[in-house]
Amino acid sequence: YNPAPSLNILLDHHSNSSVRKKQPHNQYYGYAASRAWRLRLVEGYRPEALPDRNVKYYEDTAMMRSYELIRHWSGIVTLDTKVCFNPPKGCSVPPEWIALFDEDDEDEEYEDIDIPTVYVFAVCSDLEDSFEQRPTQEEVDYMTKLFGHAPQCYAFASEVFVVVSLTLFLPICLEQFARDNGYLQPEKTEPCSSLSATAPASADVRCAVKIGWLWIDTASFSLYVYSISVALQALTVISMGSIADRPLYRKPLLLTFAAIGAFSAILFLPLSSTSPLWPVSALLAIFANVGFGASVVAMNAYLPSLAKDSPEIAQAKYDLPSSCESQNEEATLAASADDELGHSLEEASSPLLGYPTHSGTSQSNYDAALSRATSRISSLGIASGYGAGIILLLVALVPVTRLHGSTFSLRLAIGLSGIWWALFSIPAAIWLPNATNIEESPAEYGTVNTDNDWTFSSEIAAAWRRLGVMLRWREIKRLQHTFRYLAAWFLLSDGFTTITSTAILFGKTTLHMQPSSLVLIGAITPTLGIIGSLVFPSLQRRFMWSNLRVIVLLVIMVSLIPAYGCLGFLPIFKGDGRFGGLTTQGEMFALAVYFGFAYGAFQSYARAFYAELLPPGEEARWYGLFSITDKSSSFVGPLIVGLIADSTGNIRYAFFFLVFMVWAAVPVLLSVNVDKGRQDARDYVSRRALVEE
């Protein structure tokens, strides 16, 4: 078995050798695949080819269908399946292993030996006939992609909604809906729309809309709606967790919530602000945001597996030195734990990974390489999402400019983002399997029943119970550095999101910027986000910065934006013709460049750094908690900013709150010990395996 999923060097070596050294036993070259991986593959792509789940031979049929499916996709007619010995790197197969499989050997001293094996889709062996019929490099490359690459097409579809609608057009449109139905304060008798066309740019007027019996500032209306949407999003994400853990339901859940979000955005097109049904806009915004947040939860779990399957990590992993004895002890321990859980030796999807004890230098090099690969992949994902958003922003800029920022033009932009979301989700619906490319812990899958004796209500209750278990004080103590980062993320996620929405509303209501100018700012920010997400990894490699150092630097950079806005209260920045303290529209454009450059990099590094602190094999579960922490905090900032704007009549006062929120996270971040956090995460998994044994 070849642990590095690339055969070009091997094939080139053999093709240039007239005589190959014959090994005493056959060697097969191919790709390891656990039983659970093969089961989820078939359930994702060919569920119609499987019998009823209650049938005894269900899994055996799935194993056969997985081989047929991969052989058909790859086009490798000689593809074979083998259960191979899996000795430690650099070690030959011990003779006692071979003796155990010798039918004529009756020596009882070998009976209790636990032998690490691996199930392999073999593309060739060292047999003469097999080597001569070896597959082409293109076919091998396809296999590499199949086993080591999770699809990311859905991010290209959904991130457009974030860039175009969630951070830009939805806050503006909701405020405009409220303004078109609001009245000027304090008398509340003259419609706000009567002043919109004639008021000077510096007019200090407040507009309020009546919702039920309550008068609300039009800018606060948008913030309150967003706050409610993220609160409901958090509840939804928590509740769907256990259901999404079922392979057959993860993809349908993703696509269902994507459809809810996309069509909620599309329904802005026929909804007029002059209609008596205009408050429905708030419900549509809530459904769209909930749909987006719930649909991307499953996608976050792909990041760790993508990083571990990248070429540089495969090489670094293979270069880790390990003694035969330590590897065998680890394999024995893993096999014992698997037996106790009712799984076969095949259940370890990548037996060569394990958790061996390596030398400090080699382990450090591997961790550093994994950290760089994670941040690189995360940065590329952010860049592609931003790129898609910029494309649609430029398209939306045409109607917004031609229609002079009318309410219809804003609705059109939101509707276009929904159409984009829906259309580009189709490739995901076709290509995306039911999480077959995610490495999941066998123990976790062992808790999911394979029968049909479950209900949505029971699974929702189970999800909340599991969240309670994860948040026990005992778990927090074992993974204290992971939870410290989650505490910092709670503040930073809310702070950064609120800075974005507050800045847009500040530009519209205080600086009286036209919608076309705000659209231009909306295009500048993600454009610089792409640049930032690509530049900072280069700076990191050049100066050998850790992910934590980069995050702290980015947090300090972003915190300067609301701090700069607070300077606007100083007398020297007030009056006509003055500049500074975020009192002019030109400063908004400059800060959009600055914020986008830092925020784009922050988003990629925030996910990448968290991946370093996760228990191996449990990425999906802990990324769910990451998303929950994000969504459960993101309603606090908009709610407080809305209350500040309502009580003071000046949204600029909210900048003081934002400075405090972001700076409060810095000492928490600095308390995170990355090396200790990594080791705690590894020990956490090992401890769980021993307890279960």
Image (spheres, helix red, strand yellow):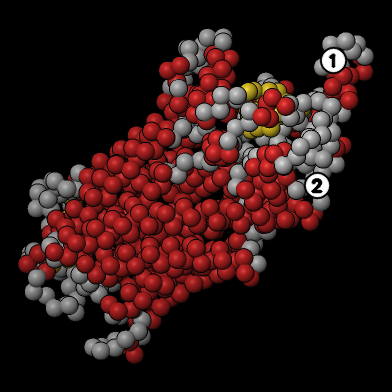
Q: Earlier in the sequence, mark 2 or mark 1?
A: 1
Quarter containing the N terminus: top right
Most foreground residue, 486 or 256:
256
**Secondary structure of residue under mark 1:** loop
Please say whether residue 647 is visible from this viewpoint: no
Q: Residue furthest front?
A: 18
Quarter containing the C terminus: top right
In this view, the mark in front (2 or 1): 1
Say left or right for 565 vs 365.
left
Give the labeled residue for mark 1: 102
* Residue 644 point in image, percent of width and height: 33, 66
Give the labeled residue for mark 2: 321
**Secondary structure of residue under mark 2:** loop
For residue 586, which quarter of the picture? bottom left
Most foreground residue, 101 or 547:
101
* Residue 19 point in image, percent of width and height: 79, 35
* Residue 379 point in image, percent of width and height: 50, 57
Say left or right for 127 vs 373.
right
Q: Amino acid at mark 2?
A: Pro
Say left or right for 368 vs 438.
right
